[in-house]
Amino acid sequence: MVSKAKKTVALPAVVDLDSLDAIRDGLLDAVEDGSVAVAADGVQRVSTNALFMLISAAGTAQRNNFDFTILQPSAAMTAAIERLGLGAQFKGMMR
């Protein structure tokens, strides 16, 4: 499969229920077109639902044979991932 240039989706500082729709729409467009990089260095707070959405988007990208990476996850995001026991699911995608 020919992949277009990698798209970057930047996460806001607060990734909660109010911001999920916009992020989801951006991720859906990106994972259908090619490889995706999620910029997560500015995340200060992240909801559990948002983390599950990222796992789902990574699965969709993988099924489409595209890369899915999370670039420079913030300490707050990394702590939330570990606190919820999702380290194994995120291990291969965080850079």
Image (cartoon, rainbow, N blue to C red):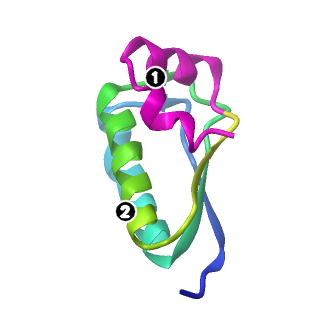
Mark 1 or mark 2, earlier in chain:
2
Q: Which mark is residue 91?
A: none
Is residue 78 found inside the magenta-colored segment of the image? yes
Q: Nearer the viewer, residue 92 or 54?
A: 92
**Nearest the camera: 90 or 25?**
90
Quarter of the figure with residue 32:
bottom left
- Tell me which residue sits at (36%, 17%) in the image: 84
The CA distance from mark 1 to mark 2 is 20 Å
| Quadrant housing residue 25 | bottom left
Above or below, comparing residue 77 to residue 89 in the picture: above
Give the residue displayed 54% in from the left and 42% down from the top. Answer: 11
Q: Position of residue 21 (x, y in %)?
A: 31, 50
Per the image, the residue denoted by label 2 is: 60
- Report helix, strand or loop for mark 2: helix
Q: Amino acid at mark 1?
A: Ile
Residue at horizontal 56 percent and vertical 42 percent from the top:
92
Residues tagged 1 and 2 counted as in contact (Cβ below 8 A) = no
Which amino acid, by three-letter code, is at mark 2? Thr
Say which residue appears at 69% left-offset and 40% top-offset.
95
In the rendered view, would you say 36 is above or below 11?
below
Give x and y (percent) for residue 74: 64, 25
Q: Nearer the viewer, residue 88 or 94?
A: 88
| Residue extending farthest bottom | 2
Q: What is the x, y in percent for residue 3? A: 60, 81
Secondary structure at badge 1 equals helix
Q: What span is in magenta?
A: 73-95
Q: Nearer the viewer, residue 11 or 69?
A: 69
The image quadrant that residue 42 belongs to is top right
Say whether residue 48 is left or right of residue 45: left
Crowding at label 1, few (<14), some or many (≥20) Cα neighbours within 10 Å?
A: many
Q: Where does the image place residue 8, in percent across and percent down from the top left?
A: 63, 59
Residue bearing the label numbered 1: 81
